[in-house]
Image (tube, grey):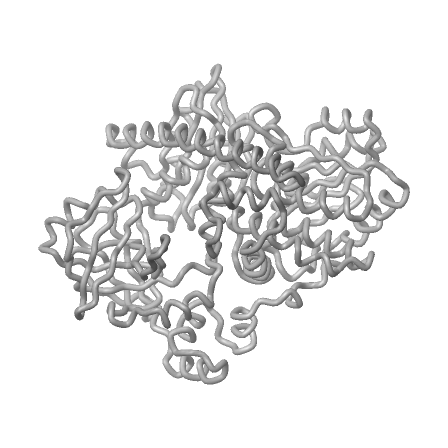
């Protein structure tokens, strides 16, 4: 069913499937397409894709296509960065011990790796602390600072944490510990009274790029330190780790983040660090051109598994390992933790899916609130993310252990999860997070009340409509339009991620030429043909679509990304399906 929205863009409402989406097909102005193509000497398809991403002027589009290290901003534009640099240099010169205080996720761990390596290169005496997720939880803790003071630490530098550590910073002052906070989370109720607070999201900070992750801000601190000390030539080598943290934290891959990701991925093709090489090998990526998808789904989960499964130091020590054997041992341990995480995650995911399928009221609720006894809290966020994606519904997953409910929530764009939890503040012991991701804790007896109250909030939230999903499609094509030349042009927009998604296309009236196969119980693979051209199509997590596809009469329309299917001795383009419509 075709319709035109209020902006004049064509929308195709997918029919025939309960889970299908609205396809909103972009229609860029052809005059602008030709003008941009001529100015930049690029094909029309690439110009169209740039325009679809809001890049209408030639110079921003040129920079987007050719990210350079020189495109990075002056780090000293950040508030308090000069104060931070001066205090760190003083600590280095006076041989004062520095504690790097990080976080247990990929962003926090890679930020520690970046700053630790830089400080060691400058000759600093430093140590680090990564919280044990299942013991300490998130954020700076006073006992850790007290221990650091007893051990002779005189300066604490945080990465990816600290912007809300008011009490911890006050205690540090009482212990004569200077604190430099570097963080990217939104400040609340003013800033902690630290010596320096480096965060581009400060309301008074003029820094042009507000979307850096913790690893990105750690790099900006290193950039400033190395600029002051004449070590700028070493900066590009850090971008491999910066790219991993940036991609894993799902920040917008535009602006400086695009530079980090693009140049860092190029560096990952030939890593010298033994730990990084071992991580790439255990992830099965050796000898391959590593993409942002590989980082997000192969490298980052292995780093993340350390914190999720209760560890703390393995990821940081991996990057510090100089011995090839030790690096491989650590990489193998991270691989084992990741497999363990996958098994536990799958068990909880299946349990939540069964709960939704058996409870019509839960299935129909605007917000899915699902609790279970003794679920591993390290994987709740991943499960919440998958349920939220599948049902396009804000989702809270809660594990009850000894009458304490620990929860993690995820929400689609358009719903502010943190504000929803704020409306239930009086029944929560603690909570925090962002618009689309949050964590919380409450007494187990209050879970039912939370379910009732937060759904009541959702009902009054206005424009958000649970279950309504829209795909922003770049163009409608025929299979005969798709070849290696088009694929190469698409790849000039990579790396893909938030605010720079992989181009999405629609092709209609495709004929099935092989019966779909179910892979691993969840995915579909089939082959389609149009105008004499046949291509494989891979549909992740769409095994439930098989009955409708088989009843379609052998004709389907697809919304898809264009991808490569690679294995030794074989390469072919394939369609990665995002939605299916029967004819």
- The structure residue drawn at horizontal position 69% and vertical position 35%, both measured from the top left corner, is 165
- Asked whether, in this view, residue 85 is left or right of residue 284, the answer is right
The reply to whether residue 453 is visible in this rendering is no
353 with respect to 114 (left or right): left
For the residue pair 547 and 10, the one nearer the viewer reads as 547
Q: Residue furthest top?
A: 402
Residue 536, image x, y percentages:
25, 57
Residue positioned 81% across, 26% down in the render: 151
Is residue 580 toward the left or the right of residue 96 in the image?
Answer: left
Q: Is residue 231 above or below residue 189?
A: below
Task: Residue 8: name its quadrant.
Answer: bottom left
Locate residue 307 relative to residue 206 in the image: left or right.
left
How many labels, in total?
A: 0
Q: Nearer the viewer, residue 518 or 53?
A: 518
Q: Residue 420 in the image: x percent, y percent?
A: 46, 39
Quarter of the image for the C terminus: give it. Answer: bottom left
Residue under the image location 76 percent in, 43 percent down: 180
* Residue 490, x across and y down, in percent: 41, 67
Q: Position of residue 243 (x, y in %)?
A: 57, 53
Q: Looking at the picture, does residue 169 appear above or below residue 290?
A: above
Q: Residue furthest right?
A: 94
Considering only vertical position in the picture, is 537 above or below 480?
A: above
Residue 192 appearing in the image: yes
* Quarter that holds the N terminus: bottom left
């Amino acid at each position: 069913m075709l319709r035109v929205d209020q902006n004049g863009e064509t929308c195709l409402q997918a029919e025939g499937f309960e889970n299908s989406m609205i396809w909103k097909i972009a229609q860029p102005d052809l005059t602008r397409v030709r003008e941009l193509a001529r100015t930049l000497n690029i094909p029309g398809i690439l110009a169209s894709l740039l325009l679809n991403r809001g890049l209408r002027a030639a110079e921003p589009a040129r920079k987007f296509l050719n990210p350079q290290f020189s495109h990075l901003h002056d780090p000293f534009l950040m508030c308090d960065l000069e104060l931070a640099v001066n205090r760190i240099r003083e600590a280095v010169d006076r041989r004062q011990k520095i504690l790097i205080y990080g976080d247990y996720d990929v962003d926090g761990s890679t930020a520690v790796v970046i700053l630790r390596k830089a400080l060691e290169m400058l000759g600093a005496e430093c140590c680090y602390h990564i919280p044990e997720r299942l013991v300490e939880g998130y954020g700076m803790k006073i006992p850790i600072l007290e221990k650091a003071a007893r051990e002779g630490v005189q300066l604490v530098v945080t990465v990816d944490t600290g912007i809300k550590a008011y009490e911890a910073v006050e205690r540090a002052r009482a212990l004569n510990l200077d604190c430099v906070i570097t963080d990217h989370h939104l400040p609340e109720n003013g800033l902690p009274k630290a010596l320096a607070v480096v965060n581009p999201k400060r309301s008074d900070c003029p820094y042009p790029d507000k979307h850096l992750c913790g690893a990105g801000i750690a790099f900006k601190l290193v950039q400033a330190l190395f600029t002051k000390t004449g070590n700028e030539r070493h900066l590009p080598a850090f971008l491999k780790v910066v790219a991993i943290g940036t991609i894993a934290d799902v920040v917008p891959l535009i602006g400086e983040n695009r530079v980090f990701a693009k140049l860092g991925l190029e560096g990952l093709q030939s890593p010298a660090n033994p730990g990084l090489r071992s991580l790439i090998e255990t992830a099965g990526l050796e000898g391959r051109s590593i993409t942002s998808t590989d980082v997000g789904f192969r490298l980052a989960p292995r780093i993340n598994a350390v914190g999720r499964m209760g560890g703390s130091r393995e990821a940081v020590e991996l990057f510090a390992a100089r011995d090839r054997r030790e690096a491989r041992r650590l990489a193998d341990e991270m691989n084992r933790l990741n497999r363990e995480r996958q098994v536990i995650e799958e068990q909880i995911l299946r349990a939540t899916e069964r709960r939704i399928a058996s409870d019509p009221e839960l299935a129909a609720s605007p917000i899915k609130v699902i609790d279970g006894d003794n679920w591993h809290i390290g994987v709740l966020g991943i499960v919440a993310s998958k349920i939220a994606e599948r049902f396009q519904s804000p989702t809270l997953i809660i594990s009850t252990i000894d009458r304490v409910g620990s929860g993690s929530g995820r929400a689609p764009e358009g719903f502010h999860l943190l504000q929803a939890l704020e409306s239930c503040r009086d029944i929560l012991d603690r909570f925090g997070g962002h618009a689309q991701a949050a964590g919380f804790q409450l007494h187990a007896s209050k879970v039912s009340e939370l379910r009732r109250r937060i759904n009541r909030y959702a009902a009054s939230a206005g424009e958000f409509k649970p279950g309504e999903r829209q795909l922003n499609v770049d163009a409608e094509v025929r299979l005969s339009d798709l070849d290696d030349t088009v694929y190469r042009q698409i790849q000039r927009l990579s790396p893909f991620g938030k605010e720079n998604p992989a181009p999405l296309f629609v092709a209609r009236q495709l004929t099935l030429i092989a019966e779909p196969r179910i892979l691993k119980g969840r995915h579909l693979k089939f082959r389609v043909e149009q105008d004499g051209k046949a291509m494989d199509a891979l549909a992740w997590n769409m095994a439930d679509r098989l009955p409708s596809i088989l009843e379609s009469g052998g004709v389907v329309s697809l919304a898809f990304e264009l991808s490569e299917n690679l294995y030794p001795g074989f390469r072919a383009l394939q369609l990665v399906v995002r939605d299916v419509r029967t004819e």
